[in-house]
Amino acid sequence: MQLRDAVEADAGRLAALTDSPRDVMRNLVHDRTVRVAEQDDEIVGFVSFDARERTVHVTQLEGDADVYQPLLDEPIGFARSEGMSVELLAVDTEPDLQSAATDAGFEEVGPGPNFEGEPTTRYRLDP
């Protein structure tokens, strides 16, 4: 598996992974840091994140559970190099994401906002 920066041409595959419109994913590539995981020249997952107020916020993590860990290493590495914390929200019905977060060293810090009617849990890592 190889990790690389997303480019606009990836928007179609990102849209397929998220069941989102292509334009939304194109905007994501332009507005956030987006890293994709490729295997055999196919995108199998991605992570998007941005940095605000001394915290790196993971805004989206998509793909099979086996790519979560290397993808989470991207915002964590950025946060470490900048002396920042990392936060992510996990929908409570996504145990694979919750497990990946705790395996990466994140701690559960309480409930997050509802996302599309689903409760979330907030996770934080202070590297």
Image: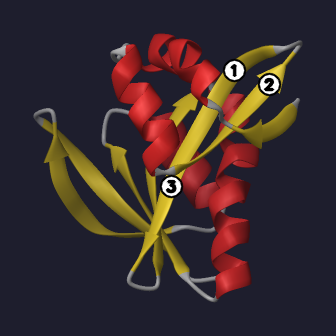
Q: Describe the element under mark 1 as helix, strand or loop.
A: strand
Q: Earlier in the sequence, mark 3 or mark 2?
A: 2
Q: Earlier in the sequence, mark 2 or mark 1?
A: 2
Name the residue that disc number 1 marks. 44
Quarter assignment of residue 126: bottom right
Farthest residue, direction bottom: 83
Disc 1/disc 3 C-alpha distance (Å)? 17 Å
Position of residue 88 relative to residue 124, above or below, is: above
Q: Describe the element under mark 2 as helix, strand or loop.
A: strand
Q: Which residue shows up at 74% across the image and 31% down it?
A: 37
Disc marking residue 69: none
Q: Quadrant of the N terminus?
A: top right
| Callout 2 amino acid | Glu
Q: Quadrant of the C terminus?
A: bottom right
Q: Mark 3–mark 2 contact, CB under 8 Å? A: no
Q: Nearer the viewer, residue 59 or 98?
A: 59
- For marks 1 and 3, give the one nearer the viewer: 3
Q: Mark 2–mark 1 contact, CB under 8 Å? A: yes
| Callout 1 amino acid | Val
Q: Nearer the viewer, residue 53 or 31?
A: 31
Measured as percent of width and height from the top left, residue 24 is found at 35, 27
Q: Which residue shows up at 87% across the image and 34% down it?
A: 2
Disc 3/disc 2 C-alpha distance (Å)? 18 Å
Measured as percent of width and height from the top left, residue 81 is found at 73, 81
Name the residue that disc number 3 marks. 49
Q: Which residue shows up at 53% across the image and 31% down it?
A: 62
